[in-house]
Amino acid sequence: MGLINMSSEAISVLEMRVLDANTAYLGIDSRILMENAGRGVAQIVSSRWPNAGKVLVVAGLGNNGGDGIVAGRYLYNWGKDVVIILLGRVSDMREEPAATNLKICLNLLGCRVMEARDELELLSYQDYFIKWADVIIDAILGIGVKGRIRQPASAAIDLINMSKAPKVAVDIPSGLDPDTGDVADKAVKADLTVTMHKAKRGLIADKAKPYVGELVVVDIGIPKEAELIVGPGDLNYLTYARRLDSKKGDFGRIAIIGGSRDYTGAIALTALASLITGADLPIVYAPHDVAHDIRSQTPNLIAVPLEGEVLSKDNVGPVLRGIERANVVAIGPGLGLEKTTMEAVYIILETAVKLGKRIVIDADAIKAIGIGKKLNLLKPGVVLTPHAGELRELLGIDVPKLNPIETGQWLKEQVSKCCPGSVILLKGNTDVISDGSRIKLNMSGNPGMTVGGTGDVLTGVLATMLHRVNDPLEAAAIAAFITGVAGDLAALELGYHLTPMDVVNRIPKAFSIFINTKGIIEEALHKPLREYLIKHQLIKGE
């Protein structure tokens, strides 16, 4: 068993869920984590109370209960008399890997499991709490607890608190809010809390001390890469569902600025990627001919024409009016580097920063900042998406040839020096993302995506994510991951014969691999249609 230094940073429930999912993505099965967690609890109980011969495990029906059951199995193997009171029927425990661990315990001749399907049945076992147990393990409710506690869990908490036996909480005392340390209804008053991987924020709150008791953190085998890599877990930061009373514009009004006489397609790709990612109103601001080309090619995009062949300080007025209403500003694809264009870029960025807008800066807009030495414009909420050459033009230094983790550390140092709080997404074989204090590594994508235009697609996905995800670093990480997965899906189907639109068209599929998008949409259907579709077996329903 490995104990983690308590000075390590506490994390939220959301961050823990991200880690769990990314750990599974790296190939570490949740059964391994549960086994490590349960064994860790058992070792601590055995070492702290070596003479305690009778151990009562009170287990809920979720994976917190599974951790307790594993602890009980180990303690039984080590010669303890173990009783597990399950708050429900054995058949009700369906969540894996808890269900499998319950079956394992039932196969052991001396491991006693008692069902408490309701409060009255639980009360028939009260002597186990009050008279029998030398130690009680609380594995009733995990980190997902919110609000009033239902029976029989509520009565179980009361019985645990009435007992004079030492009480050990698994991960968090049941009933305690793991993020705030609040107790909305009631909570176990533990003598010792054994939490997994890192302390949850609520556990270290002063108001939680009467419930937490001594706090021990156990290393259950989550690798450091689970925090570094971008994976399915990071999508927990994104709320995919939409409110039923949503209206046009609620899910993103994106001002997209770019295009010139030489580069007409880049800005359209950015806008289409933003639209298909889920933005309601991606609005393109582009020179006259570019805007009219976009209008003639697709009815899906709004394109506002600017007078002249390039963006300039003389035609920037409509852009400035547009970004006042925008949630996010994306600037750079296809702009060119005319002097007047760079001056316009500075004016737009100064205005957007003053208005507190979130901003994506790509391509020629990155170069313009480097040329004009305008790093002062890079504030929190600003995300840049350079490749190595563009980063050199921005910062005046070469990206060293290091492994991805070392590159991440190097980039973190550079961001902390030049523009702390802003985010740089350094595109490459492994995308490296940092805000000057944190690092994320994205390993989706393939060599077929070197085709021109895929970076413009990323900019559009990122612009939408900046509106949908609170944390700009995570918005950038998710955008890189989803764009890379869409590119991987395209390559698997087409080989290395990709166009940027092949990537754009697979963005919805990339989301649906990791999110139950169909189920979310079914729940949003009007009731009569939903019931009709269920009746005719066109959807499954509940």
Image (cartoon, rainbow, N blue to C red):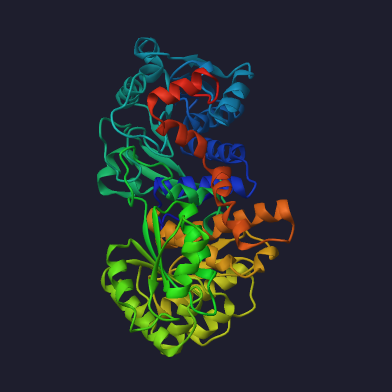
Q: Is residue 319 visible?
A: yes
Q: Closest to the observer: 40 or 378?
A: 378
Q: Residue at x 29, y 75 (%)?
A: 351
Say whether residue 208 is left or right of residue 197: left
Count of labels in the image: 0
Name the spot of residue 293 as percent of width and height, x first. 50, 68
Based on the displayed image, in which of its 4 quarters is residue 463 positioned? bottom left
Q: Residue at x 26, y 48 (%)?
A: 206
Q: Residue at x 46, y 68 (%)?
A: 292
Task: Using the image as rendered, state which of residue 226 and residue 480 is in the foreground.
Answer: 480
The percent coordinates of residue 27 (x first, y second) are 65, 46
Q: Quadrant of residue 486?
A: bottom right
- Asked if residue 386 lies left or right of residue 202, the reply is right
- Where is residue 418 drawn, in percent x and y? 41, 80
**Where 286 falls versus 325 (above or below)?**
below
Q: Is residue 542 visible?
A: no
Residue furthest to the right: 495
Where residue 366 appears, x then y in whole percent?
A: 47, 79
Height in image: 70 above or below 296?
above
